Amino acid sequence: MSHSADNPLRVAVLISGGGTTLRNLIEKIATDKLWIKIALVVASTEKAKGQQYAIDGDIPISVVDWKSFDSTDAFSEAVFGGCRAAGVDLVVMGGFLKHVLIPADFENRVINIHPSLIPAFCGEGFYGARVHQAALDYGVKLSGCTIHLVDNHYDNGPVVAQQSVPVLADDDADALAARVFAAECELYPQVLQWFAEGRVTIDGRKVAVR
């Protein structure tokens, strides 16, 4: 189904920390070039500072504190139960650091952005500065970001899009992270616009944009 500026794609954004991805999406929506409506922000902890962006944007917030649940199943059901209640079309992970299990009705409807070119430097334990330091330690000449569909394993779902950035000789983890994040800020909204326009097709692990 395709959407428009007047009939935007409804999304939930999942956060665990500062909410920089959420802030970027809110800014892009304000330009009228991104046909999505953030119907819900889900925070995995009350300490997630990114909630302030939702408050400022008058976006509903659901705090689903992972520490309150005794299993991943129960935590996941609480997360996606809120998404169902909000009537979202797509779930967007924006720095969401907790593992969830994807229910059948959300298969191929959850996307994540990872700060490397998957399958390099990904999987359990690879997040934040750890990813960039691993890239530097390995000596790669290119890094970047990957947007992928989410399944029940870390950074394993089908790749939707990737953007590369150079790794420079004098980079430290912070410098590389800043360059990758700049790419993320352009690629994530672009991919969400593709979804809003109904241009994304999924066939197993093969994702195409029409």
Image (spheres, rainbow, N blue to C red):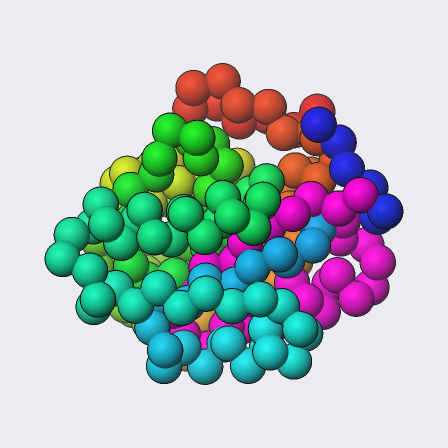
Residue 27 against residue 46 in the figure, above or below = above
**In the picture, residue 193 is in which quadrant?**
top right
The reply to whether residue 163 is visible in this rendering is no
Where is residue 206? Give x, y as percent: 48, 23
- Of 65 and 14, nearer the camera is 65
Quarter of the figure that contains the C terminus: top right
In the image, farthest residue toward the top: 203
Question: Image point 30% across, 49% down: which residue?
Answer: 76
Question: Image point 36% across, 81% down: which residue?
Answer: 47
Q: Is residue 18 left or right of residue 161?
A: left
The reply to whether residue 103 is visible in this rendering is yes
Q: Quick check: is 139 in the magenta stretch?
A: no
Q: Is residue 120 left or right of residue 143?
A: left
Q: Is residue 148 left or right of residue 26?
A: left
- Of 144 and 44, nearer the camera is 44
The part of the chain drawn in magenta is 7-35
Residue 36 against residue 150 in the figure, above or below = below
**In the picture, residue 169 is in which quadrant?**
bottom left
Q: Is residue 121 left or right of residue 145?
A: left
All told, the count of numbered labels is 0
Residue 54 against residue 87 in the figure, above or below = below
Quarter of the figure that contains the N terminus: top right
Question: Image point 69% across, 44% down: which residue?
Answer: 9
In the image, farthest residue toward the left: 70
In the image, farthest residue toward the front: 85
Where is residue 23? Give x, y as percent: 61, 72
- Of 4 and 64, nearer the camera is 64
Where is residue 133? Give x, y as percent: 29, 69
Residue 195 against residue 114 in the figure, above or below = above
